[in-house]
Image: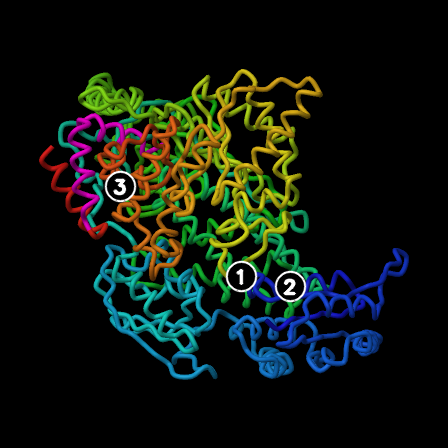
């Protein structure tokens, strides 16, 4: 691949240009900098040896493009060429393009696999676009929607016409999947809504795609121009024809007020109010008025609008906005991880759309242009582009899409808060209460604690808003669209709400309370029956037991797992300790978390998986970069064995936490006997060091491995001699067995753990483990599907580990079965030739049971 070198007198400038360029291509292009000199008193300058080393670090026979600022930078670059071998010099090109614009144009061209001459042409032509922009007024610097498909130099433009059939069309989550899929390809991709007569928009812009207003039944055209156009269109077609993985069954939305509890008007504060039912359930509790902490600004007396002021150093201001965007991304990623555990991946995908919003190229380009051309501060520019996007949504005639303004404002306010340095607001109530507010953002709602917030009453919103969706997922009764009078209530006022009818009673009469409590008690009895099953052992009708553990990624997740009836933790993903940081967690930091989780489990088993990075989890400060085929690359135990200091630090923390706790250790991605032997050798070394230091630990702690690659299955009999247990990772095993990347929409459906090929791998592993006298578990999303319960039971697994919220349904499914029934289902399933046929058998058999 073509390499890029940035030569500048200022190191800060060069680093900013590199960061800006990398933001455009997500680290796919090698970029080196040679900037500044090693003199703290006079750091500005250039050094020919630095330039030479930079060129050497990114050298490729495909070519290296060197961009320079003025003066000695050019001389240093010319001198650096003399240090290179003559056969390499011909591949080095000094470019007269402007540094900032040229670098951006060059990396974008290089990322699209252009040759060196094309990259040079794009870099040198960068000023043309800038000159054009400088000739336009502010109104023309807004987000641009093209009228015709873009044509590039890659060849023929292909197109497909499709009818979108999922229930809400391209709403936030499907739009996010659509944009993510399109962004994976080099081709230029556009889409238009034929039904609404829209113009073509960029397929890599979350806002432009969402604002097309594509609803169920709308016909769209997708065009792609480029070397992988056909593959791109096929992937998008698969995504759309499979309804983006959504269930098209309409959800149960509470409607129609109940006739037996009348509304009594009042000349002052009403005794009851009618709103829009959003999440079913009865709640009776004191009122708590939520007032969000406003963003404060040092540069202005206004508490509502960000400051507007002139900036001289536009590069530094753009970097400031980039830093705030990165911080906001980290916060949303944390919220996404938390929500995935608490409410499930489907609902948490709302925040995938938030992440894509922050990466929307039309937004970033507009913000960048305004900072550099108008010399405005980051807050003013960001507020401007947010207002523009919100206005675009507001002008749509689709009420559902108009509700996406809440998501735009949510993300926009998050970035403004980071820029201002205002702390994050947390909804903290002194006692269980019904939350009353003018509005709640999706982020606010996802962060609520259902044990403290018993109900939600807001004056904004609708039953299809993301706030309502999240409230239903959390099981919190909610009413939206209430009259503003409710905001006049004092904290502590007794309220009763019925999320099924949308009614709120203020200081309810005794007879009203009796009727509501009767309904609430009936609802709670049903929930209690479910919880009772969840907190019992996983047991079949004929008393065969299977351990039901949880997959967790934090301390909070662990508490949720216990609440849902987990009998232990079958997979603690320790990667969460390493994410959203600039340095690796220390031994003491890890120890504190492991001990806290073990304390919550209260002697229940805790299986800690050592660091599993690589694949789809890249951590830059550990040196885990991007790979062309990451799932087959440097990941899991391979990385840890190459970085023994990282593994040893983690093992010390795990061993120390094991004292007086039932902790087991599990190594990921084991493919050979040599790997587990090497990992055990490092573990023995750490145990010896702790012995010598007199540090106590569980010397009988069990050691296990993840079985997630075919090689581990085929030599399971040999691996079983080295460990105390197996845990089958069906997410990875499925994609390796079926040679199908589960993150690629075009082939992801092939990576199905219910395919007979995968089921036979699981069976073979269980048999090998049991023959060697060790227990065998399974951790993977397949366990979260109650339909798969008889298969997992019949295969003879000793333990399953799944997402906490899926535990009650799994235990409920197990309780309906006998072991012979499950074994008979497995025997039939293993004889099928597709996952679809296995599912047909499961549906038929479970219906009979």
Q: Position of residue 153 (x, y in %)?
A: 48, 84
The Cα–Cα distance between marks 2 and 3, rounded to whole angstroms, is 42 Å
Q: Which residue is mark 1?
A: 384
- From the viewer's perspective, tell me whether residue 692 is left or right of residue 530: right
- From the viewer's perspective, tell me whether residue 559 is left or right of residue 470: right
Who is closer to the viewer here, 265 or 844?
844
- Quick check: 68 above or below 276? below
The answer to whether one can see residue 443 in this image is yes
Q: Which mark is residue 276?
A: 3
The answer to whether one can see residue 312 in this image is no
| Mark 1 or mark 2, earlier in chain | 2
| Mark 3 or mark 1, earlier in chain | 3
Q: Indicate the quadrant containing the N terminus: top left, top right, bottom left or bottom right.
A: bottom right
At a point 65% along the width and 69% down the height, the residue shown is 372
Secondary-structure class at tag 1? helix
The Cα–Cα distance between marks 3 and 1, rounded to whole angstroms, is 32 Å
Q: Which residue is mark 2?
A: 376
The kind of secondary structure the magenta stretch mainly shows is helix
At a point 68% along the width and 76% down the height, the residue shown is 65
Badge 2 density bin: few <14, some 14–19, many ≥20, Cα 10 Å: many
- From the viewer's perspective, tell me whether residue 389 is left or right of residue 510: right
Who is closer to the viewer here, 530 or 680?
680
Please say if the residues under marks 2 and 3 sit with CB atoms less than 8 Å apart: no
- Range of magenta residues: 804-832
Q: Is residue 817 magenta?
A: yes
Please say if the residues under marks 1 and 2 sit with CB atoms less than 8 Å apart: yes
The Cα–Cα distance between marks 1 and 2, rounded to whole angstroms, is 11 Å
Q: Position of residue 602 (x, y in %)?
A: 46, 17
């Amino acid at each position: 691949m073509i390499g890029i070198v940035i030569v500048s007198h200022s190191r800060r400038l060069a680093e900013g240009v590199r960061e800006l360029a990398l933001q455009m291509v997500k680290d796919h292009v090698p970029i080196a900098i040679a900037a500044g000199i090693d003199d703290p008193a006079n750091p500005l300058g250039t050094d020919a040896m630095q330039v030479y080393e930079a060129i050497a670090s990114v050298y490729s026979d495909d070519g290296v493009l060197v961009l320079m600022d003025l003066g000695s930078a050019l001389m240093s670059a010319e001198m650096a060429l003399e240090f290179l071998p003559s056969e390499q010099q011909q591949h080095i090109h000094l470019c007269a393009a402007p540094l900032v614009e040229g670098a951006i144009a060059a990396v974008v061209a290089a990322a699209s696999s252009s040759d060196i001459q094309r990259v040079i042409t794009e870099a040198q032509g960068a000023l043309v676009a800038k000159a054009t922009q400088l000739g336009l007024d502010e109104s023309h610097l807004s987000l641009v929607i093209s009228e015709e498909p873009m044509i590039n130099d890659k060849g023929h433009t292909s197109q497909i016409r499709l009818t979108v059939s999922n229930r809400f069309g391209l709403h936030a989550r499907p739009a996010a999947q659509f944009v993510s899929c399109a962004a994976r390809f080099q081709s230029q991709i556009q889409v238009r809504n034929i039904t609404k007569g829209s113009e073509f928009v960029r397929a890599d812009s979350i806002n432009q795609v969402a604002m097309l207003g594509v609803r169920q039944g709308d016909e769209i055209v997708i065009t792609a121009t480029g070397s992988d156009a056909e593959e791109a269109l096929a992937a998008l077609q698969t995504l759309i024809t499979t309804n983006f993985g959504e269930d098209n069954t309409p959800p149960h939305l509470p409607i129609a007020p109940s006739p037996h509890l009348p509304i009594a008007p009042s000349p002052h504060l009403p005794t009851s109010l009618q709103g829009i039912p959003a999440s079913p359930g009865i709640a009776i509790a004191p009122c708590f008025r939520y007032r969000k902490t406003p963003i404060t600004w040092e540069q202005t007396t206004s508490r509502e609008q960000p400051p507007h002021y002139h900036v001289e150093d536009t590069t530094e201001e753009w970097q400031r906005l980039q830093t705030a965007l990165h911080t906001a991304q980290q916060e949303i990623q944390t919220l996404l991880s938390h929500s995935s555990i608490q409410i499930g991946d489907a609902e948490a995908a709302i925040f995938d759309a938030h992440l894509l919003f922050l990466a929307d190229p039309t937004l970033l380009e507009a913000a960048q242009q305004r900072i550099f051309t108008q010399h405005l501060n980051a807050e003013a520019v960001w507020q401007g582009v947010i207002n523009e996007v919100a206005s675009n949504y507001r002008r749509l005639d689709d009420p559902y899409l108009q509700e996406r303004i809440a998501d735009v404002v949510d993300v926009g306010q998050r970035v403004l808060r980071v820029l201002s340095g205002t702390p994050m607001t947390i909804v903290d109530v002194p006692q269980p209460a019904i939350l009353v507010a003018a509005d709640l953002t999706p982020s606010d709602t996802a962060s609520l604690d259902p044990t403290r917030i018993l109900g939600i009453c807001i004056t904004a919103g609708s039953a299809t808003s993301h706030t309502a969706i999240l409230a239903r997922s959390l099981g919190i009764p909610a009413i939206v669209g209430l009259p503003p009078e409710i905001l006049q209530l004092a904290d502590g006022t007794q309220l009763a709400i019925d999320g099924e009818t949308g009614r709120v009673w203020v200081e309810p009469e005794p007879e009203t309370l009796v009727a509501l409590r009767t309904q609430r008690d009936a609802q709670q009895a049903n929930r209690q029956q479910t919880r009772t099953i969840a907190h019992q052992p996983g047991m079949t009708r004929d008393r065969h037991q299977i351990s039901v553990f949880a997959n967790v990624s934090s301390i909070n997740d662990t508490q949720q797992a216990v609440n849902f009836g987990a009998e232990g933790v079958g997979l603690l993903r320790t990667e969460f300790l390493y994410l959203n940081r600039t340095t690796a967690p220390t031994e003491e930091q890890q120890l504190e978390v492991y001990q806290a989780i073990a304390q919550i489990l209260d002697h229940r088993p805790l299986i800690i998986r050592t660091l599993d990075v690589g694949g789809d989890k890249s951590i830059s400060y550990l040196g885990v970069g991007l790979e062309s085929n990451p799932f087959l690359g440097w990941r899991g135990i391979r990385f840890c064995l190459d970085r023994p200091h990282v593994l040893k630090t983690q093992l010390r923390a795990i061993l120390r936490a094991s004292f007086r706790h039932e902790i087991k250790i599990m190594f990921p991605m084991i493919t050979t006997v040599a790997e587990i032997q090497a990992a055990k050798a490092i573990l023995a070394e750490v145990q010896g060091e702790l012995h010598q230091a007199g540090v106590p630990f569980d010397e009988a702690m069990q050691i296990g491995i993840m079985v997630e690659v075919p090689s581990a299955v085929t030599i399971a009999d040999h691996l079983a001699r080295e460990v105390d247990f197996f845990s089958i990772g069906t997410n990875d095993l499925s994609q390796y067995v079926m040679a199908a990347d589960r993150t690629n929409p075009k082939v992801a459906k092939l990576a199905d753990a219910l395919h007979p090929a995968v089921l036979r791998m699981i069976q073979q592993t269980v048999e090998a483990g049991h023959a060697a006298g060790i227990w065998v578990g399974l951790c993977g999303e397949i366990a979260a599907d109650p339909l798969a319960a008889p298969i997992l039971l019949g295969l003879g697994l000793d333990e399953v580990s799944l997402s906490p919220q899926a535990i009650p349904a799994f235990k409920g499914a197990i309780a309906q079965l006998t072991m012979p029934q499950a074994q008979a289902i497995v025997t039939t399933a293993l004889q099928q030739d597709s996952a679809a046929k296995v599912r047909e058998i499961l549906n038929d058999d479970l219906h009979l049971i």
